[in-house]
Image (cartoon, helix red, strand yellow):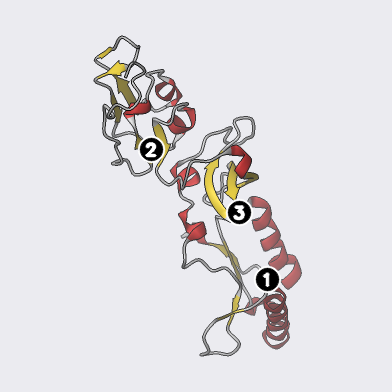
Amino acid sequence: NKTGMGKEPFYSVDTSHRAITVDPNKCIYCGRCERACEYDALEVRAESLDEKGRPVGLVIDFKENCVSCGKCVENCSTGALNKSNRIVPIQSEEVREIHTTCPYCGTGCQMILKVKGHTLMEITADPEIGPNFGDLCVKGRFGHNFIQHPDRLKAPMIRRQKGMPLEPVEWDEALDFMAQSFSRILGEKGPDALGGLSSARCTTEENYAFQKFFRAGIGTNNVDHCARY
């Protein structure tokens, strides 16, 4: 028809990228994605424009130096570039936003979780908040499937006696068990019989409180960190 509605798509949807789905049929050839990429890792080109101003012979190509940060996706206004792990189209009134810190490295990038019910729909970042100012790496923007993974631990687990299997318990019981065990070991063998292993996925403040607990509370310097290995 005259509006062009109902025609077969000009191009097939490309799902070969590990994190980004490309639908050239939605591209309006604005160039925002190219300008947003600080690595010059994205090329959008067209042979010509048709009588309605639509690109003909359109190619959206990711180069070898693409780091999959997703900044091009955040700047695409039409959905030609989309997140492969986005569950369903998101309506703003259906989600709530949670501001938090990225759980991966120690940079402390700030991110916004878009949550519908108990399901994480996608992750974005605020361009006004540091230290990342809207930027996220491939892990921060796309690497959140572990949150809904069936193997994820959803409750604290304790081993009541040596040789017994771990069993899930409520937090109050787990904390009481830990406090009693710490007190018993301190009384029997002293503070250096205890040690703590922290994680790079914790914030700086959490790691500071962790080492302070062991050094000032327990009285031992046996504190280590997984990122050191």
Mark 2 or mark 3, which is nearer the start of the sequence?
2
Q: Position of residue 24 (x, y in %)?
A: 32, 28
Kindly identify the residue that appears in the image at 32 percent across and 40 percent down. 17
Q: Mark 1 or mark 3, which has the lower sequence index? A: 3
Residues tagged 2 and 1 counted as in contact (Cβ below 8 A): no
Which amino acid lies under the numbered mark 3 shown in the image of this protein? Gly
Residue placed under numbered mark 1 in the picture: 220
Residues marked 1 and 3 touching at CB (< 8 Å): no
Residue 196 in picture, x, y percent from top left: 61, 69
Q: Amino acid at mark 1?
A: Thr
Calculate the distance from the C-alpha at mark 1 to the C-alpha at mark 3. 43 Å
What is the CA distance from the residue labelled 2 to the residue labelled 1?
A: 42 Å
- The answer to whether any part of residue 108 appears in the image is no
Q: Is residue 180 above or below residue 108?
A: below
Q: Nearer the viewer, mark 1 or mark 3?
A: 3
Residue 67's disc number:
2
Q: How would you rate the neighbour count of disc 3 (Cα within 10 Å): few for under 14, some for 14-19, many for 20 or more?
A: few
Tag 2, which secondary structure?
Answer: loop
Question: How busy is the neighbourhood of tag 2: few (under 14 within 10 Å), some, or many (20 plus)?
Answer: few
What residue is shown at x 50% (from left), y 66% (from top)? Answer: 152
User: Is residue 185 shown to the viewer in this render?
Assistant: yes
Please give the residue where the numbered disc 3 appears in the rendered image: 117
